[in-house]
Amino acid sequence: MIRLLDLSKTYRMKGRSKVIARSINTVFPDRTCVALLGRNGAGKSSLLRMIAGTMRPDRGAVWSDGSISWPVGFAGSFHPDLSGAQNARFVGRIYGVDTDALLDFVQDFADLGQHFNLPFRTYSSGMRSRLAFGVSMGIRFGTYLIDEVTSVGDAAFRQKCDEILHARMKQSNAIVVSHSMPTLRKMCNAGAVLEDGRLLYYDNLEEAIASHHRNMGLKE
């Protein structure tokens, strides 16, 4: 379970303010895969980063009784001069997992060939996504935070991503950001809508989608 307690966040740039979270109090229960919906710029990715602990809120806190992943597929924390293998081993040590087993999983899943042992800075964007997703899926979390990750790579890799995500969701919770309603309907059983800094949670996914469509002025 994840609980957001009076969570607040405002961006301030060039004299302007953008509210991402207005004293949000929400519970994401166990055994759920929640679709996080909202218009572009609403702050969905920022909310995921606050839940992950990689962004500090202005006020409030995030409480969980289990482990939470970083946003799945995020490659921003990899060291550019370390190889893919070295980066994977470093992350494994931070999370206290069997690093040899993690490397075997990532090498097989990401299918980077000889590039797995080359510096991360030499990777293409697609290769970076493969490595990041492989490391994310190689570590078991109580809740996975997923931000448009299934849109990366070619069709074969996206299929591989879909398959392992569904396997992980059988034992873990998830909060998923995606603009693809078919993807959300396939993965999720509940929803939360972020609008103007306020978050409304729905036990029924279709009710969440309908609420989001109303905010967007779309026909249901």
Image (cartoon, rainbow, N blue to C red):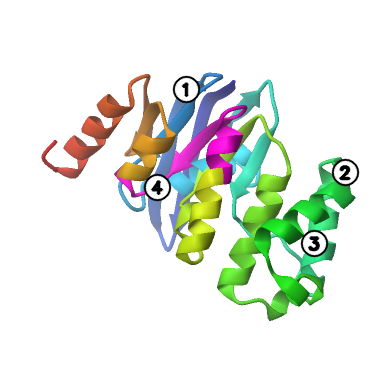
Rendered image: mark on residue 26: 1
Image quarter of residue 120: bottom right
Whether pointer 1 and pointer 3 mark residues with C-beta atoms closer than 8 Å, the reply is: no
Whether pointer 3 and pointer 4 mark residues with C-beta atoms closer than 8 Å, the reply is: no
Q: Earlier in the sequence, mark 1 or mark 3?
A: 1
Residue annotated with mark 4: 178
Rendered image: mark on residue 98: 2
What amino acid is labelled 3 in the image? Asn
123 vs 51, nearest the viewer:
123
Q: Earlier in the sequence, mark 2 or mark 4?
A: 2
Q: Position of residue 205 (x, y in %)?
A: 33, 27
- Per the rendered image, the range of residues in magenta is 164-181
Q: Secondary structure at mark 2?
A: loop
Residue annotated with mark 3: 87
Relative placement, left or right, of 84 versus 186 is: right
Q: Residue at x 50, y 24 (%)?
A: 32
Does residue 18 appear anywhere in the picture? yes
29 vs 116, nearest the viewer:
116
What amino acid is labelled 2 in the image? Asp
Q: CA distance from mark 3 to mark 4?
A: 27 Å
In the rendered image, residue 165 lying in the magenta stretch gets the answer: yes
Q: Position of residue 130 (x, y in %)?
A: 62, 62
Image quarter of residue 171: top right
Q: Residue at x 42, y 46 (%)?
A: 43
Q: Position of residue 140 (x, y in %)?
A: 71, 37
Q: Earlier in the sequence, mark 2 or mark 1?
A: 1
